[in-house]
Image: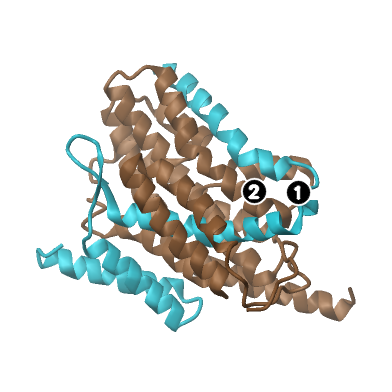
Amino acid sequence: MTGKSEVGDEQRASAARRRLLVNGAGLSVTAAGFALVYGVAARQAGFSFLETMAMSTLVLAGGSQFAAVGFVTQGVPWIAIVGFTALLNARHLLYSAALAPFFQDRPRIERAAMAHALTDETFALSIAEARDLGRGDRRGYWLAAAMVCVPWIGVTALGSLGGQFVPDPRALALDVVFPAAMAGLAAGFISGRRELVAAIGGALIAVAAGLMLDPSIGIVAGGLGGPALAMLVPTTVRATPTDPMSVPQSGP
Amino acid sequence: MSTDLVWLALLMAAVTYPSRALPLLAPGIERLPAPVLAYLRLIGPGCLAALAAVNAVIVKDATGRPAIHLGIEIVAVLLCVAVVIWRRDRLLLGLVAGIGLVIVVRAAGLG
């Protein structure tokens, strides 16, 4: 790579990170809002400050943390809570598999650390940035992770220590930000028929399986089934040579 | 200060981390066959759409069973998607439009 193209690549990366910052702003606010609610709920359920913070820093997965609060309150055995957590968080396997080809050049220790910060939102922001750039961007990944994890952990502490003045997230429509952001980021991926079928198929399969079984199973089923359905469709876009995940594409 | 549930947090983290880490740490994932890489490339839109759909239209009823809920939330999600398609990569604009709609509708007692 020449010096000139390196400069151009770094400019593109900077622009992609700026887009990531703007796109992630809403997700940061949402993470903070729900962390506040989580912190208060955990304290009301009898979790100590240390226990509440251990959940947010070690588990770092909102859905399973809220579920754990409910389960502990109802006296559900730990083995069941841990089993449910494994099932609920199995979707991260898909995120990790999708991101892995973009970060194979990073040291193993860094990839191990990246894995801990891999949340729904980190995945959404970083995979969108990787799509923009056609390559992985470690600074972009850590930026995405920080935009979600820092408010989540920090505001959990605020909620746990003194969250009696917590506003209702519904009143601020914070409950809509997460699904809207996920859908908006998914829409940004649509560059051909395959991506369109993966998204629509994933959504339909997720809702069907979620209604029949459980919403967490629906997410995994949609995440696996939508792309499988899309693989049956001929592609309409050509791969870019810099995309590490690109493959030769057939015409329409 | 009680610390019993720190052990529960550790156990929950222990079953969560492998699903986050295994593919990222697997050697040679970029050398997978082309169809597998093509499939992985489609997981982004598939997973994100699945997350959006489940969070927008499925709620738990009084007995804890999943039930469908077609309310203002799905309209807001579709509005956000429309804005993103109309003004490419303007997610924040889409979010503001969707949230604004929900706040107005709920304030009017309709949502």
Colour that chain A carries in the picture: brown
Q: Quadrant of residue B101?
A: bottom left
As drawn, is B61 to the left or to the right of A134?
left
Colour that chain B carries in the picture: cyan
Residue at 41% from the left image edge and 36% from the top image edge:
A64
Number of other residues with Cα within 10 Å of mark 1, as a class: few under 14, some 14 to 19, many 20 or more: some
Q: Is residue A147 above or below residue A53?
A: below
Residue at 61% from the left image edge and 68% from the top image edge:
A17
Residue at 37% from the left image edge and 72% from the top image edge:
B80
Color style of the picture: by chain
Under tag 1, what secondary structure? helix
Q: Which residue is mark 2?
A: A97
Identify which amino acid the numbered label 2 is placed on. Ala
Q: Which residue is mark 1?
A: B29
As drawn, is A56 to the left or to the right of B54?
right
Under tag 2, what secondary structure? helix
Q: Is residue A227 above or below residue A77?
A: below
Q: Quadrant of residue A176?
A: bottom left
